[in-house]
Each structure stands twice: as structure tokens, then as C-alpha cells.
Amino acid sequence: PLEIVEVPFGGTTLTAYLQVPRNVEKPPVIMSWGGVDGWKEDRTRIHPLMHEAGFAGFAIDMPGTGENPVKHTDPAADGAFAALIDYLRARDDIDGTRLGVWGGSYGAYWAARLAHTEAERVKGAVFHGGNVHHGFQPEWMKPALTERASVALFGPIQLLQSRSRAMGVDTLDEFLKAAPKLSLLTQGLLDRPCAPLLCVNGK
């Protein structure tokens, strides 16, 4: 059964969908999320396969999308993930100490980030087609949001609009100024301890 979970955070609420497999005692958990065009409602479709492998599925919205009130560039986003991890570790019907995370597309960034910032509490992370450093630089990001965006699901304008909403900015110039600050290399996180990290990309 799908359980709607609400976790208080900073005067607001983080909403997630938890599904625990039957006949598995205290299963480990996979917390997953998508990018700007994939929400927790979509992520639950993979839960049956997680259940077959003995995992509980915990689907969330990436910062700045769906019902997540925290923007992609908000420093509080790290705290929001920490609050969700705290919640999972406090439950007695799952084993939140055995936690894997899986971020898809533009949201894959958070899987790589958590592998470093939560290296002691995340047992493994899947970075599925996102950005870490180069993909946040203006020389890469500008053509990605204009010239090359015609191959995207939303097209150039809607891709920029959806990513801008997630980032908490309004214009392309604001986006190009804000994005480099997300670089894990510039922030010095890549030199810190890291949980096992599987990086997947390509067509």
C-alpha cells in the first residue's frame, strides 16, 4: 500500500510516498526522485521492482519541483534531505540505516551531492544522467538551454522555464549566474569522503 508521508521542515512540509514490501522484515530503503519533468508520482512505478529485490521504495520530489517547497539553489535543500533521512531512520518497520539514493536527470545532482554530504548515512547512490561541475558552467548550460534544447521533451522555452522554476530564478541570465554555484568541484565536496556512487548516462 502507498503511504503518504509528511515530514515537517522549516515551517513547511515535505511530502513523500512510501511503499514497504510485504513479508520482508525491516527492509532497506531506496529514496528516489526525478528531474524537472519527473515527480514522485512517476517514481513509484519502479517500486514493484524494488520490492522484488527486498527494498522499500521512498519517492520524493527534487527540490524546486512538485510539492517540494525548497528551491534547487536554496542552502536549506541539504537540510530537507537530511530531514527525510532522519525520518526514515526513525521508523521501526524499515531499516533507514541501510539507505540507497537514486536521482534522475537534472535531479541526479542531489544523488552525487548526498554521496558526499551524507557519506556516513547513505550506503550507495545512483547518479542517473545529471550535472556535477561542467554541466553547470555557462559555456555548457547556455547552448543546452537554447540551441540543443530542441531535442528535449519540453523544447527550448519550456525546458528553460521548468529548470528556472526549480532553481528559483526568472531569466536565462539569472540562471547562468546561479548554476555555477552548484558545482560540487567548486564547493570542494569532491575531495571529501564519498559513499559508493554509480554514475550512469548516455542514450
Image (spheres, rainbow, N blue to C red):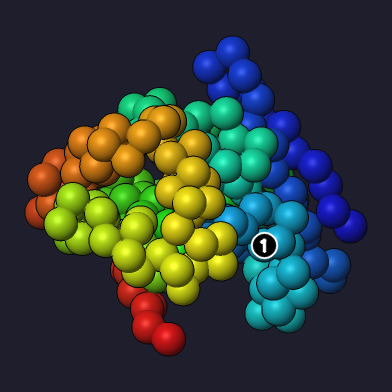
- Locate the N terminus by quadrant: bottom right
Say above or below: 156 vs 10: below
For the view shown, which residue lies furthest in the bottom direction?
203
Crowd around label 1: few <14 · some 14–19 · many ≥20 (10 Å): many
Residue 95 visible, this angle: no
Give the structural element (helix, strand or loop) at label 1: helix
Q: Residue at x 34, y 58 (%)?
A: 146
Q: How many marks?
A: 1
For the view shown, which residue lies furthest in the right direction?
1
Say above or below: 144 vs 181: below
- Residue nearest the observer in this picture, 87 or 104: 104
Indicate the position of residue 156 as horizontal and vertical percent values.
45, 58
Q: Residue at x 67, y 53 (%)?
A: 40
Residue type, label 1: Arg
Indicate the position of residue 194 as horizontal and vertical percent values.
24, 59
Indicate the position of residue 70 as horizontal and vertical percent values.
50, 29
Q: Residue at x 62, y 48 (%)?
A: 60
Q: Quadrant of residue 148?
A: bottom left
Residue named by callout 1: 43
- Locate the C terminus by quadrant: bottom left
